[in-house]
Image (spheres, rainbow, N blue to C red):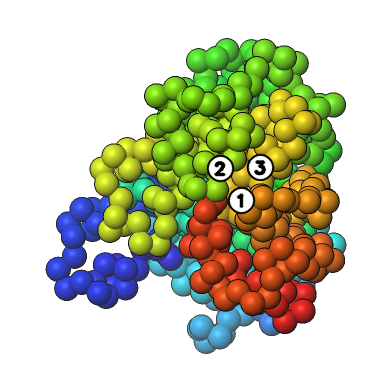
Amino acid sequence: MATFIDYNVSTFRDNSKPNKRRLQELQHTEARAHAARVAYWRKRRPGAGHRPKDKVRPIQDQTDSSLDDISVPTPTDQHDSPSDSRRISLEVSSDFSSGQKSCQELNTPGLMGMKASTDALASKGLAHFQSSKYYELADTPGHKFGDLNAFIRLTSHPKSLLFDPFDTLPSRQGEEVVTAMNHFIHHWAPSQKPGLKFQTKDNPLIRDVFPAALQNVELFEACVALCLSFRAAGSNFTTYLCNASIHHKCEALAGIRRRLISGHVDEAVIFATVLLMITDNVFLDVDAYKAHLEGLRKMLSASGDGVFAAYGGSLKSFVSWAESNGLVLFGNTNQSPSSTQTSLKLEYPSQPFSGSLEKTLANLTPGFQHMASEGHLSTHVLTILENTIRWTRCIGPDSAKTVSDDDQAFLIDFDPRANAAMVMELCRTVDHQYHMERALCKALFIYHANILHWTCRCSGYKRVVKELADTVLSADPKKQWEIDFWSWMSLLITNSARRGSLPQLQAELMAKFFSWSGRGQDWDEVTETLGAFLYHSGLGGEWRLCWAAGLSHIVL
């Protein structure tokens, strides 16, 4: 069975005396991985009421790649045996033994003997080969998924002696689940809360959501479907959901439907719905996203505000993201009925500033200080900027050596997804006369999306990028800080256009950038201009790539 952690590589490669806390975290992660596999297969038990027939038809040729290589009893072939014993006879032609062999009769668990177990293990290698061929066929277009479900029910039966459902399951289904949860724990969850020193202790997605998924099958299935969809999509804009992701998504939907029918809706069902909405967003299923958004609002209204405190506040931030992403996709036409658009009034401070505002301005970069001093930014946007600048500083590549305990406490409390959702809410509130502030709010949303590796396939993402590109191309800056601001904005949107596969916008934006800054600057001078606003070293390589391509008149 594949493990989550390669102890020899990750623990002892660079340190002969590994940290005991690190080793303990690895052991806990491995324990969670095993618990995930056990809980998953226990919750996938088939329904009772039928017993297998006395004999499963033999497999004729193990080299044949057709689906007939695998014997799957259909409901019409099953019947209730009058006796208390079950018999499964399997005849195979195998290279592992001389001649044809038959498995001994397999009785009920109370009468199982050592010989039956030995025969079952002897047939494991052949079954693994055949089931692997079956799953290769399952990935081909047009394959019927119902047959795959029947085979999974056979191989994962908790009382079957053919295969061990946990440790020796000879199907790629178990490997995909392990791979998906590995991606969830070690890649996706840490990427949503970057910079934390101890992810397993301080990240609520690992600390709270993952254990809850082991207890709620719909949440577990949604996590698996989400991570499989990420691995399938990548940076490809034409890839569709793979069969395995569709299967787990359907299982999650079935689990949510059962919970809704029972009338018991809790935070696990709500969070599973949001994860499915992320999957819909990745693969541009706008209709499904809209339906899930309406259902999410109904579940939240029935649950009350107390549910937002679940999972260390992560549920609230993910729900806020779902609403803000709905604004990106559908605009104000599909906004929540409980929206507070009219109640939020933005205040634009003027000099002399108060003591608290002076403290906030001192934490901003020089470029935003100039904007605030001339009254272009409201107090709400200033607060968001202060948190975003500090967050950017704390998650840099060299932040592990410079981040203080106060910064770590800030990273634990700060939720970038909720911050991005707040920015999009402000975009709807800012008056059109403050066009620079509106553009800044949209740019901050794109900035968060790029750092957190959100999908660039979404139509809403591309729409925001195009709106910002039109704003940048029509800008006519006069002052030096205005030129620097629009130069920073143009490079940010150029990289977003590259990620979103919009080459025409990329060329136009870089031409505008060089019309302001000229072509005589080197990258260090450009970096100094970018650092006056927001500059993350993780995105610096991508920005430099766009700058070099524009300098050479190349479109990436």
Q: Is residue 148 visible?
A: no
Residue of label 2: 370
Residue 33 location (% of width, % of height): 40, 52
Of badges 1 and 3, nearer the viewer stands: 1
- Which label is found at residue 206? none
Mark 2, secondary structure of its residue: helix
Left or right relative to 425: residue 387: left
Left or right relative to 372: residue 442: right
Q: Amino acid at mark 2?
A: His
Q: Residue at x 72, y 33 (%)?
A: 434
For label 1, the crowd category at 10 Å Cα-Cα, with few meaning under 14, some 14 to 19 and many 20 or more, is: some
Is the residue under label 2 in contact with that under label 1 (CB below 8 Å)? yes
The quarter of the image holding the N terminus is bottom left
Q: Identify which residue, 454 or 266, lies in the foreground.
A: 454
Q: Residue at x 58, y 81 (%)?
A: 94
Residue of label 3: 440
Q: Amino acid at mark 1?
A: Trp
Tell me which numbered mark, 1 or 3, is placed earlier along the sequence: 3
Q: Identify which residue, 488 or 398, lies in the foreground.
A: 488
**For residue 207, above or below residue 170:** above
Q: CA distance from mark 1 to mark 3?
A: 14 Å
